[in-house]
Image (spheres, rainbow, N blue to C red):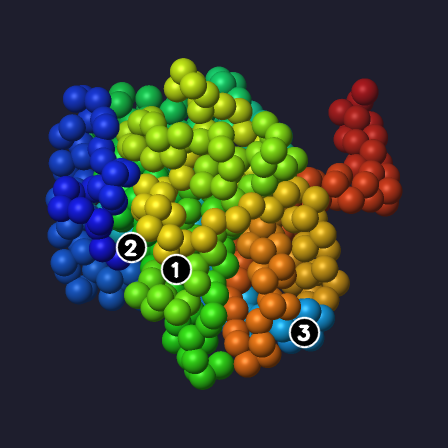
Amino acid sequence: MNQANNKKGYYGQWGGAFIPEVLHETFVQLNIAYQKARSDESFWKEYLQLMSNYSGRPTPLTFAENLSNHFGGARIYIKREDLNHTGAHKANNVMGQGLLVKRMGKKRVIAETGAGQHGVATATMAARFGLQCTIYMGEEDVARQRPNVFWMEKLGATVVPVSNGAKTLKDAINEAFRDWVTRMDDTHYVFGTVCGPHPFPEMVAWFQSIIGQEARGQIMEQHGSLPSAVYACVGGGSNALGIFQGFMNNNEVELVGVEAGGKGIDTDQHATRMKGDRAAAGVAQGYKTMFLQDSDGQMLDTHSIAAGLDYVGISPILADLGDSGRVRFEAATDQEVLEALELTMKTEGIIPALESAHAFVQAFKDAPRLSHEEAIIINMSGRGDKDIFTIAHSFDDPSWKAFIVGRGDEYRKSMGE
């Protein structure tokens, strides 16, 4: 992955490191540790070994035969990041940063999380390496991702609900930065996506590149040629950049990022930064990118059925790739996501996370227009069991409602109410 100009940490006009002076020395130390690791072949070997024997990599590339026959066009392959340890691609970045933490000698980690998968992965890494761990999570996300909150806490992490702002991911990031400023000496911020101040976008993309490296080899082995297109959902953008890097230099492979269309991009209930007209260039949370903001530069509220896609900004790397036309951006509405999810479950017996299902939506739209000799890859960034409450509610499942009511009654009885 090449930077688009000669200024470190910038991709075209996007990126940078807009940080308070108090964090300057911390970022100097982080950059040094990261660059040393990047130039040390033994570090990457240690990382690959860890991901193999602890996280279960490589993850499979599954040929979705039934979906391919259903649409009658391209052969559809699914990169199964849901089978990575902790159920999503997040472990790739977190375990890599954990190795860096060991090198830096720090004893505590903090993180932000939206869908909860990054939080679970960070708590898992902290348990594995014997680190203290605090996770910041917006109150709204805590409510809709309660199973992940439960597991974070059982793994030993302290989960701090954030009640500021929209009570979602951007607010959790703000609180994590406030924490870091107070405990720089012993704490590392395990940033979860390819955003934030340099070196986080570059570093997270590096660890996530393992997805694309695997997928490229797997598609060549199974299909015999490169895919016509690769699809990934885009919140901050780490899973997308992870798989895109395997095909970035092959212009014949179209790269498609799918954002959260929410209730529709013609409404104010979505989270599309590259598709639609509500986003503009801005500087926030330590970097410059496209943010959803009003004419006064105030960040707008976002909406997505998927907690991991409602972030107000986008990776500076992806913003640049969008500017150049290397990545095509589309949007999937909440309703389209539920329909794609249901079809995938009933056709293939695979349950994508709500985030991942956004990528399935656009792939399903494009597949029928391609020939059966062509292949496409969908990056399934996570599994859908974390979304059981949201999915069951959205499908208005009566048996699920009865189960929840019944368990509530049992709990009240056990508490003597």
Label 2 neighbour load within 10 Å: few <14, some 14-19, many 20+: many
Q: Quadrant of the C terminus?
A: top right
Q: Name the residue type under label 2.
A: Trp
**Location of residue 333 in the rendering, given as x and y in whole percent from the top left corner:** 64, 43
Mark 3 or mark 1: whose residue is earlier in sequence: 3
Q: Quadrant of residue 71?
A: bottom right
Label of residue 133 in the image? none
Q: At 47% across and 63% down in the image, what residue appears?
A: 230
**Location of residue 79 in the rendering, given as x and y in whole percent from the top left corner:** 50, 65
In this rendered view, identify the residue nearer to me: 96 or 235.
235
Height in image: 163 above or below 124?
above
Dot 2: what SS? helix
Q: Do the CB atoms of the residues marked 3 and 1 lie less than 8 Å apart?
A: no
**Is residue 199 shown left or right of residue 67?**
left
Give me the C-alpha separation between circle 3 and circle 2: 36 Å
Q: Quadrant of residue 40?
A: bottom left
**Can residue 258 be seen at all in this image of the molecule?**
yes
Dot 1: what SS? helix
Give me the C-alpha separation between circle 3 and circle 1: 25 Å
Mark 3 or mark 2: whose residue is earlier in sequence: 3
Label 3 neighbour load within 10 Å: few <14, some 14-19, many 20+: some
Q: Name the residue type under label 1.
A: Phe
Dot 3: what SS? loop
Q: Quadrant of the N terminus?
A: bottom left
Q: Nearer the viewer, mark 3 or mark 1?
A: 3
Label of residue 206 in the image? 2
Label of residue 72 in the image? 3
Label of residue 244 in the image? 1
